[in-house]
Image: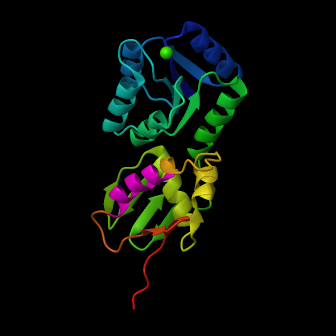
Amino acid sequence: MKILIVEDERKIGEYLRQGLTEAGFVVDLACNGLDGHHLTMTESYDLLILDIMLPDVDGWQILKSLREMDRCMPVLILTARDSVDDRVKGLELGADDYLVKPFAFTELLARVRTLLRRGTTPVAETTLKVGDLELDLIRHRVTRAGHRIHLTAKEFVLLELLVHRKGEALPRSLIASQVWDMNFNSDTNVIDVAIRRLRTKIDNDFEPKLIHTIRGMGYMLDVPSEE
Ligand code: CA
């Protein structure tokens, strides 16, 4: 498993590189945004650990270029600023998870492993179908009525959860814990933003609508019965 770290603070970068190397990963370290940007565009990695505050090309720009290129490697954002705005912005730009500095290495390693584990799926179940929506769990491809739909890694996990539990009203708290490994409590904005993005891709141009809002509770994916 190959990981790219983009971090301009040498101490943190080296510390992460050493720790992840000892944990058995192959690690590249870019110490500025330009190098990081170049590597994400040209090399292939299983995961990107991305600092946001970089002096030249910042993390937002790198993330944006990456998603515009439709490269679907998972992205873990490192941010010094613990604001909802940053988290929402990160998710809107297609980040999969984030850590607020300072963080413990064990916490980072746990997040890395979770993100990488999601990249692989059990052999038995390779395709999920709901109506004309199809999820290929091996290649992480989604189609609706035969049209390819491009999702970020996080959006895919979210959709996979909704499809797996089709017809069940899922509380926001459950979605938060299953998709983000977190207890968001009152901060459900992140989930609503992610669902909105998913709806735009899955439902906007198609009928019938599959993702339903359960007021005051959460969301459900289902095909309306034909009556
Ligand atoms: Ca920095």
- Which residue is farthest top? 10
Q: Is residue 141 above or below residue 107?
A: below
Q: Is residue 105 above or below residue 167?
A: above
> On the image, which quarter does residue 23 sit in?
top right
Frontmost residue, 142 versus 101 = 101
Quarter occupied by the N terminus: top right
Q: Is residue 94 above or below residue 36?
A: below
Query: How many tags in the picture?
Result: 0
- Residue located at (42% from left, 40% from top): 94
> On the image, which quarter does residue 36 sit in?
top left
Q: Residue 52 in the image: state x and y as whole percent.
A: 46, 23
- Which residue is farthest bottom? 227
The answer, for residue 186, to whether it is visible in the render is: yes
The answer, for residue 138, to whether it is visible in the render is: no
Q: Is residue 114 left or right of residue 74?
A: right
- Residue located at (55% from left, 34% from top): 98
The answer to if 183 sits in the magenta stretch is no
Magenta part of the chain: 191-203
Query: Please, which colouring scheme is shown?
Result: rainbow
Frontmost residue, 85 versus 177 = 85
Q: Is residue 142 left or right of residue 25?
A: left
Q: Residue 39 in the image: state x and y as whole percent.
A: 41, 20
- Residue located at (63% from left, 35% from top): 111
Q: Residue 51 in the image: state x and y as whole percent.
A: 49, 22
Q: What kind of secondary structure does the magenta stretch mostly adopt?
A: helix
Quarter occupied by the C terminus: bottom left
Q: Residue 44 in the image: state x and y as whole percent.
A: 44, 29
